[in-house]
Image (spheres, rainbow, N blue to C red):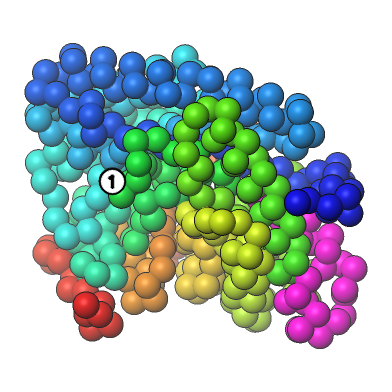
Amino acid sequence: MISRLEISETNQMIEQEKLDVRTITMGISLLDCIDTDKEKLKKNIYDKILRLAGNLVKTGDEIAVEYGIPVVNKRIAVTPVSLIAGQALKTPADFAEVAKVLDKAAHDIGVNFIGGYSAIVSKGMTPADRNLILSIPEAMEETENVCASVNVGSTKTGIDMDAVFLMGKIIRETAERTKDRECIGCAKIVVFCNAPDDNPFMAGAFHGVTEGDAVINVGVSGPGVVKTALTKVHGEDFEVLCETVKKTAFKVTRVGQLVAHEAAKRLGVPFGIVDLSLAPTPAVGDSVAEILEEMGLESVGAPGTTLALALLNDQVKKGGVMASSYVGGLSGAFIPVSEDHGMIEAVEAGLLSIEKLEAMTSVCSVGLDMIAVPGDCDEYTIAGIIGDEAAIGMINQKTTAVRLIPAIGRKVGDHLHFGGLLGDAPVMAVNPASCKELVTRGGRIPAPIHSFKN
C-alpha cells in the first residue's frame, strides 16, 4: 500500500522537482512475423505492431491524467530486425524498406521512437546482420522515428573488431547523409557492448529474444528530485548522503512500479521491468551534473567526479531494487552531454573532456552518450572510441555504449542544435593521434579470462 505521506511526497516531486515517467515502452516480438516473401514480412510486422500497440499512446495519456503523473514518452521496441528478416531481405536496400515500415507504424500509433532496427554481432556477422548494418545510413536518413543499435561485444564473447570498424564507417556515412539536419541520424544510433534485452530507453531499445511475445517496460527519471533531496543534507557525511540518494530512488521507483502495472493491466500485456535511470533533460534543474556538483564538486569534470558518479549510480540501484518487483534495463545514471545543461556548461568552460567522460563511463549506467565530435573526425577515430568503450564494458561486465555525432562542417566550440529532448551538443575535441593500424587489423578480440564461469 502507498501511504498518504508517500502520496504527498510524490505530488511534491512531480510539481516542484520535475519527476516524471520518462517512457512507457512496449516490447513486441516479431519472431512470428518471419516470412520468405518481402511484402508479406512487411505486412506482418506492421499489422502486429498496430494490433498490440495501437492503444499505447491513449493508455499512457489516460494514466497520466488519472494519476497526475507526467508520462513523457510512449515508445515501442521490437525484436532485432536482423534476426527476423534474413529469409526475405537480401540487400541493404531491402532492409531500409523495413525501416520505413517501422517508421510508418510508429507514426500511425503516435509514438516518438521505435527501436529494434538492430543487430547483435558480438561474435560475428551473418549476411542479414551485415546487410542491416550497411542499410543504417539510408534508414536513418529516410525515417524520422526509427532508432538503430548494434551490439559489438560482450564479456562472454569478446569484441568483434570487424563490426567495430564497420560501425565507425556507418556513423561517419550517416552523419554525411543527414548533415543538412544537424547530423540527426547519428543521434538515433547506439553501439553497445553487453546490451541488455529489456532496455526501454532509446536509441538503444530492442525487444530481446529472451522476452515474451509482448511486455511493458517503464523508464523512470528524476535527477531534479535527487538534487533537491541532496540540498537538504548539504555538508553531511557520506553515510547521510548515500541514505538520502537511496531513499529518494526508492520513492521514484515506486511511481514507476505503479504506472507500469497499470499500463500492463489496461493493455493486456505482462509487466516487464522498471528502469530507474537518472536521465537528464535540457531543462534547468533536471541535470545529473548538478547532482554531482551538489555533492561537492565545483564543476562536473573536476577531480572526484568519477567517485561522485560511482556513489550516485550505486545508491540509485540499491534504492530502486527495493521498490520494484523487477528492476532491469540500464538502471543508474545517464550522462548524455547534449541533454544535460550542466554537462554542456562544463564542456564550454573547458572543464569536461571526452577522456574524463570515458573514465566516468566505467561507473555510470551506459557510456559516451550524445557527444558531438568535429566534422573531420574520421571512421578510424570513431571506431577507436567505440572500441575503448566496448573494452570498458567487456572487462567490467557492464553495459557500455557509444552515441557519437560527427558534426559535418563544424569545429570544436561549435554547436549542433537538435531541440526537444535531444538538446544542444557542443562539439568536443578529440585526440588527433591515429589508431588506424589498430582498428583495421580485423578479427575478434577474445573474451577476458573472467568470462569462464560455467
- Can residue 355 be found in the magenta stretch? no
Looking at the picture, does residue 55 appear above or below residue 112?
A: above
Rendered-image quadrant of the C terminus? bottom left
Stretch of the chain drawn in magenta? 220-244
- Looking at the picture, tell me which residue is in the foreground, 425 or 306: 306
Position of 28 with respect to 25 (left or right) is: left
Q: Position of residue 405 (x, y in %)?
A: 44, 46
Position of 152 with respect to 272 (left or right) is: left
Q: Position of residue 105 (x, y in %)?
A: 40, 19
Q: Position of residue 349 (x, y in %)?
A: 69, 63
Looking at the picture, does residue 211 appear above or below residue 396?
A: above
Q: Amino acid at mark 1?
A: Val
Q: Position of residue 364 (x, y in %)?
A: 54, 67
Residue drawn at (53%, 27%) of the image: 267
- Looking at the picture, tell me which residue is in the foreground, 397 or 363: 397
Residue 305 visible = no
Looking at the picture, does residue 416 appear above or below residue 363?
A: above
Report the residue marked by disc 1.
209
